[in-house]
Image: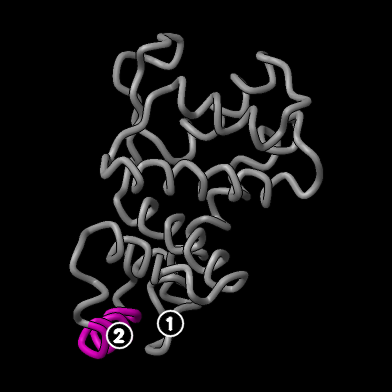
């Protein structure tokens, strides 16, 4: 999707940030958003640009979910907890059951239908599902490792803000 007029700008950004663009996913986001990305854009900002686009594409689905407002922030909170649980278990996948537990612990007033709708939306936006979403034995993996890294980063950033000595534990 890169326009020929953007090639020079994109190549300058890649040269300045060669370690940031070492995967197709990051390069794709860069090309698709070359009009708003600069040489100083970080990988975190690049992922946020992409997530905002995903939120816009899924606006109706997100706003129909039985979550408190701001629904996008609620989904981000769920995703950070999912990434944290995956990191705790040093695993790049997570079971459907674990995700259901995470959501019900964060939002105890939700019923099973609401939890399943949230999971369906998250799967549509961020996950690959092994064995199908209706199967209780399913495992979910982020469809891009950068999402996993980003949401884990958010978790650690929030925890470090509350307790800067957390990494010493």
What residue is rendered at 20% in x and 87% in y? Answer: 15
Residue occupying the far top of the picture: 135
Q: Position of residue 156 (x, y in %)?
A: 47, 64
What residue is rendered at 51% in x and 69% in y? Answer: 157
Say which of marks 2 and 1 sits in front: 1
What residue is rendered at 47% in x and 68% in y? Answer: 166
**Main secondary structure of the magenta stretch:** helix
Q: Is residue 152 above or below residue 75?
A: below
Residue 65 vs residue 39, the one in the foreground: 65
Residue 128 vs residue 152, the one in the foreground: 152
Q: Is residue 48 above or below residue 11?
A: above
Left or right of 139, for residue 116: right
Q: Earlier in the sequence, mark 2 or mark 1?
A: 2
The residue that mark 2 highlights is 13
The residue that mark 1 highlights is 41
Query: Is the residue under label 1 in contact with that under label 2 (CB below 8 Å)?
Result: yes
Residue 167 vs residue 136, the one in the foreground: 167
Query: What is the crowding at mark 2: few (fewer than 14 residues within 10 Å), some, or many (at least 20)?
Result: many
Residue 66 vs residue 29, the one in the foreground: 66
Q: Position of residue 5 (x, y in %)?
A: 34, 81
* Magenta region: 5-17
Quadrant assignment for the N terminus: bottom left
Q: Is residue 12 rendered magenta in the image? A: yes
Secondary element at tag 2: helix
Q: Position of residue 2 (x, y in %)?
A: 32, 68
Question: How far is the residue under mark 2 from the one under mark 1?
Answer: 9 Å
């Amino acid at each position: 999707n890169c326009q020929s007029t953007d090639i020079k700008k994109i190549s300058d950004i890649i040269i300045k940030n060669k370690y940031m663009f070492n995967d197709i996913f990051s390069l794709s986001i860069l090309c698709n958003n070359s009009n708003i990305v600069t040489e100083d854009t970080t990988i975190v900002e690049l992922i946020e640009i992409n997530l905002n686009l995903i939120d816009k594409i899924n606006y109706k689905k997100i706003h129909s979910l039985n979550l408190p407002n701001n629904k996008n922030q609620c989904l981000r909170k769920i995703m950070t907890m999912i990434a944290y649980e995956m990191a705790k278990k040093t695993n790049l996948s997570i079971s459907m059951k674990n995700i259901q537990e995470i959501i019900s612990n964060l939002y105890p007033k939700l019923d099973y239908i609401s939890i399943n709708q949230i999971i369906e939306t998250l799967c549509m936006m961020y996950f690959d599902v092994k064995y199908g979403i209706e199967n209780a034995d399913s495992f979910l993996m982020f469809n891009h490792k950068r999402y996993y890294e980003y949401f884990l980063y958010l978790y650690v950033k929030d925890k470090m803000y509350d307790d800067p000595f957390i990494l010493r534990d």
